[in-house]
Image (tube, rainbow, N blue to C red):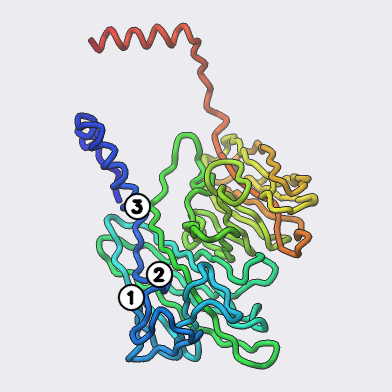
């Protein structure tokens, strides 16, 4: 949704305060609109009652799912009897040749659409084998339940869907991928708690050349998720759910509500060990000097040990060691470098593999990455001069 023009803002300032507050909350509500129908599968299929004691109900032409079309073997699942779901409610299981689809309309100007969803295995022997193919207009990914990446029996993932706008139809498709379990039975994935978020094109600010250096632009956090969002490899910054930043290996997108985040509302925890991390390329003036400031720490999730993070800024590569006791430490660091080419790489990679005492994979947190030119002279204005300038502005105004 485009920001109001300067003329619109001027008119707003002339309106009563109550109108401005209403308009602000209108914008907020519009930005957080739920694009999907029945995204948590709590609207029951036809011929299924709310007090049904049947854990798995096969969907067919007589038992259709509100908001969704489907083909193949799809079952409506109720939590319990060995099935754990994010809200202890309902989900769907994608069985043999199963595919579910929902299309929604993109709003306003072109925006990038990012999906958050939960994936769970169906059965104890299927914990490492539940796989699902997720497709959007411009991207496709294969996701599997990862053992030792959380304490819950389900996990949240983020996926970039594509760029759409002006009432274009955005199609979201989930498709099953069969695998064998430890007891030679076939395992199928459960999906639940879907959330689609629209992200406008990021604009470079004067205070940071690096787009999304604070990692605030990414998948939406689910209200009932306490373990963050897993982001698998996305080697193109354009197709990454962490906007403008490519992902290598697996990282955890964490929020300040449940983790220690050094700055803002979100940060990145590198969890899949050696060589995992994030990277991007920035167009800089060749031969000019720059500063890369950043914060490294831990997520306050009992992840203890020495984290080694390799930071690359242009042709400068430097290792930083963070000693963590798992309680939310954070330390600011910086690198000075000269841009040797117009396409300058910026990356953060882990050199260590870490686990908590519970066996959960964890690692260093990266946040608040700021890239600025060090060539621009800084002009210091004395307070007395500033006061005189302000008085002069007031006199001329009246």
Residue at (57, 30) in percent of width and height: 374
| Disc 3 target residue | 31
Element carrying mark 3: helix
Q: Residue at x 53, y 22 (%)?
A: 378
Tag 1 or tag 2, which sits nearer the N-term? Answer: 2
Graded by Cα atoms within 10 Å as few (under 14), some (14 to 19) or many (20 or more), the crowding at tag 3 reads: some
Question: Do the CB atoms of the residues marked 3 and 1 lie less than 8 Å apart?
Answer: no
How far from the left and from the top, in percent, is residue 27? Answer: 30, 47
Look at the picture and state if 55 lies above or below 1.
Answer: below
What residue is pinned by disc 2?
Answer: 39
Q: Quadrant of residue 156?
A: bottom right
Where 289 falls versus 181 (above or below)?
Answer: above
For label 2, the crowd category at 10 Å Cα-Cα, with few meaning under 14, some 14 to 19 and many 20 or more, is: many
When the figure is inspected, residue 189 is found, relative to residue 238, above or below; the finding is: below
x and y, in percent, of residue 295 in the image: 64, 41
Residue 117 image point, x, y percent: 49, 68
- Asked if labels 1 and 2 touch by Cβ distance under 8 angstroms, the answer is yes
Mark in the foreground, 3 or 1: 1
- Residue 183 coordinates in the image, percent (x, y): 69, 91
Q: Residues within 10 Å of mark 1 (few under 14, many from 20)?
A: some
SS of the residue at dot 1? Answer: loop
């Amino acid at each position: 949704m485009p920001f109001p023009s300067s003329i619109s803002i001027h008119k707003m300032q002339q309106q009563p305060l109550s109108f401005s507050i209403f308009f602000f909350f209108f914008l907020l509500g519009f930005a957080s609109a739920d694009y999907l129908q029945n995204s948590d599968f709590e609207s029951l299929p036809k011929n299924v009652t709310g007090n049904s004691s049947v854990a798995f109900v096969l969907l067919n032409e007589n038992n259709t799912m509100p908001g969704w079309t489907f083909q193949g073997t799809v079952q409506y699942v109720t939590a319990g009897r060995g099935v754990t779901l994010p809200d202890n409610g309902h989900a769907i299981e994608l069985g043999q040749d199963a595919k579910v689809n929902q299309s929604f309309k993109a709003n306003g100007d072109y925006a990038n659409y990012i999906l958050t969803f939960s994936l769970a295995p169906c059965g104890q022997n299927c914990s490492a084998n539940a796989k699902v193919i997720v497709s959007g207009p411009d991207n496709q990914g294969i996701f599997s339940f990862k053992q030792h990446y959380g304490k819950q029996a389900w996990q949240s993932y983020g996926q970039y869907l594509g760029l759409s706008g002006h009432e274009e139809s955005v199609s979201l498709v989930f498709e099953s991928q069969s695998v064998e379990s430890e007891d030679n039975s076939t395992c199928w994935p459960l999906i639940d708690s879907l959330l689609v978020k629209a992200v406008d094109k990021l604009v470079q600010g004067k205070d940071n050349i690096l787009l999304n250096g604070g990692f605030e632009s990414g998948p939406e956090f689910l209200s009932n998720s306490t373990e963050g969002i897993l982001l698998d490899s996305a080697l193109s910054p354009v197709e990454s759910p962490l906007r403008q930043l490519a992902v290598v290996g697996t990282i955890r997108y964490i929020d300040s509500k449940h983790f220690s985040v050094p700055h803002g509302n979100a940060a990145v925890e590198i969890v899949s060990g050696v060589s995992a991390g994030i990277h991007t390329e920035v167009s800089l003036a060749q031969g000019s000097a720059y500063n890369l400031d950043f914060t490294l720490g831990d997520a306050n999730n009992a992840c203890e040990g020495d984290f080694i993070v390799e930071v690359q800024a242009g042709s400068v590569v430097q290792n930083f060691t963070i000693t963590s006791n798992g309680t939310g430490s954070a330390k600011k660091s910086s690198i000075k470098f000269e841009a040797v080419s117009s396409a300058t790489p910026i990356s953060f990679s882990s050199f260590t593999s870490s686990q908590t005492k519970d066996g959960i994979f964890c690692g260093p947190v990266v946040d608040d990455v700021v890239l600025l030119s060090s060539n621009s002279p800084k002009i210091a204005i004395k307070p007395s001069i500033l006061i005189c300038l302000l008085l002069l502005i007031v006199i001329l105004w009246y």
